[in-house]
Amino acid sequence: MKNWPALAVTSVLAASLLTAAPAFAGGVAPTDVEIDWQDGTLRHVVVSWKDPAPQENVVVLRYQGETAGLRAISVTADLPDTVSIDAEEIVAAVGTGSTKPLEFAVVGGNQVPPVAEAVSAAFDASTPSAPAFDGATMSATGTTTVRWKPAAMIDTTPDDPLDRTLPARFQVTYDVLGTGNRYWIGGPTTGTGISYTLKSEYDLFVAGVNEWGMGRDGGLVQARNTRLTANVPAWAVYGSGSTRVTGSYTPTDQPRQVVLQARNSQTSPWYVVSAGQFSQGRFAFALGTGGSRQYRVTTQPLSYLNGSRISYGASTIAVSSTTQLRAGAHFRSAQVPVGQTNEARLDVAPKVSTTATLQRWSGTTWTTVGPVAVRNGYGVGRIVTAKPSRVAYRYYVPATTYGGLRFAAAYTETFVNVVVPA
């Protein structure tokens, strides 16, 4: 049996082959041109015919009723009246997705027109159209289940000799983004859905498969990493609403649940500080109500557009931020007479219990007046002055721990004790 030569060897047009060759005396039209699959693998098509006497033949693949050929092969007179043609060669000749009817013409001799030929039954070499996306879901563990619907198939040559009644089959493949590599997920399946787990950025496709091979694929799912950034202040004052953790995420056109997490040390577990639903790719969280700790921002995987788009979850790196105590002080009275006591009142947040130091400005440096006990964030220092004066004071509150969190030391702003004559 003569095999069809490889594409790189035989790709001439039948018409040009025939007209370029000299007339072959005695060429007669063959009879009984038949086509069939070579075997159950459906990989080769056999064309056979009958010649009344040994003669050279040309087997031409062409569209039904046309004279120009798509592929042609010569068969010398000493060979059997049959050729085996790779089905992939036929599909390559007509192109994936073509639905125009085909035929094989077997020419007797190698003649200029009029040509003595016989023609096979019409057939099609159509691969299936791409299935339609029917939705996808992603589980909490990252397993994606995707569904599709078979595309309608129009048979332009129903019940031709090469038709096979086979169940619809599909092949799922994916591209790893940025590599140009295509991978199969299993083999052809008769199902209309598949579950898989992938961690990389990818594009998922599904194609219909029939006796002519795999058709054009259709894109079903795109998975991309989330680009997540966070700006964590290195320093914050307790309770300061103006200090914020800000950042961005992708895709920017989708609302996203973003979570601010913290941990008290590099070895302690993360816990949620705040969470919110944000839009337009930006988020912001108030900072300053916690102690000195590490922060990060996280977001969970996002599936949208009926599951056809996946944005993986992401976390920013851990960033340390120091929170300072918030301390304020004032004198009970705006001014007092000589010899009377004035109270230097101190308020600290959070409501720590510690020992603060009251300090006085000497004119050249700060000097210590004395310790002041602070209980639940409140302390009182008492001052008696023997002569009229105007002196600035401040409190120093040392670093301390509150609720298991550490807070940095703080100074109050200066406040003035005014003493007037009695």
Image (cartoon, grey):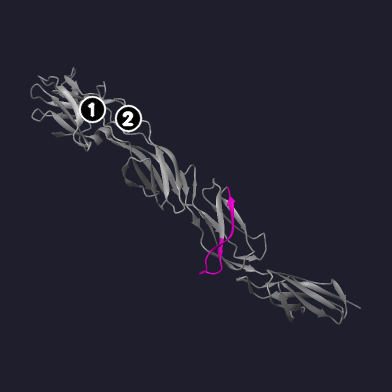
Q: Which mark is residue 125?
A: none
| Residue 150 image offset from top left, x and y in percent | 38, 35
Residue type at numbered disc 1: Pro
The Cα atoms of the two marked residues, 2 and 1, are separated by 18 Å
- Position of residue 164 relative to residue 146, above or below, is above
Residue type at numbered disc 2: Ser
Nearest to the observer: residue 84 or residue 22 = 84
Query: Can you tell which quarter of the image residue 331 is in?
Result: bottom right
- Position of residue 186 relative to residue 59, above or below, is below
Q: Secondary structure at mark 2?
A: loop
Instruction: In the displayed orientation, state which residue is furthest to the top.
Output: 114
| Residue 131 image offset from top left, x and y in percent | 38, 36
Residue 379 visible in the snapshot:
yes
Residue located 15% across and 29% down the image = 74
Residue 20 visible in the snapshot:
no
Look at mark 2 in the image and give the residue it sits on: 98
| Residue 108 image offset from top left, x and y in percent | 14, 22
Crowd band around label 1 with a 10 angstrom C-alpha radius: few (<14), some (14–19), many (20+)? some
Crowd band around label 2 with a 10 angstrom C-alpha radius: few (<14), some (14–19), many (20+)? some
| Total numbered labels | 2
| Residue 178 image offset from top left, x and y in percent | 40, 49
Does residue 295 belong to the magenta stretch? no
User: For the magenta stretch, what is the residue range?
Assistant: 261-279
Look at mark 1 in the image and give the residue it sits on: 161
Nearest to the observer: residue 150 or residue 365 = 150
Q: Secondary structure at mark 1?
A: loop
Does residue 267 belong to the magenta stretch? yes
Mark 2 or mark 1, which has the lower sequence index?
A: 2
Query: Can you tell which quarter of the image residue 47 is in?
Result: top left
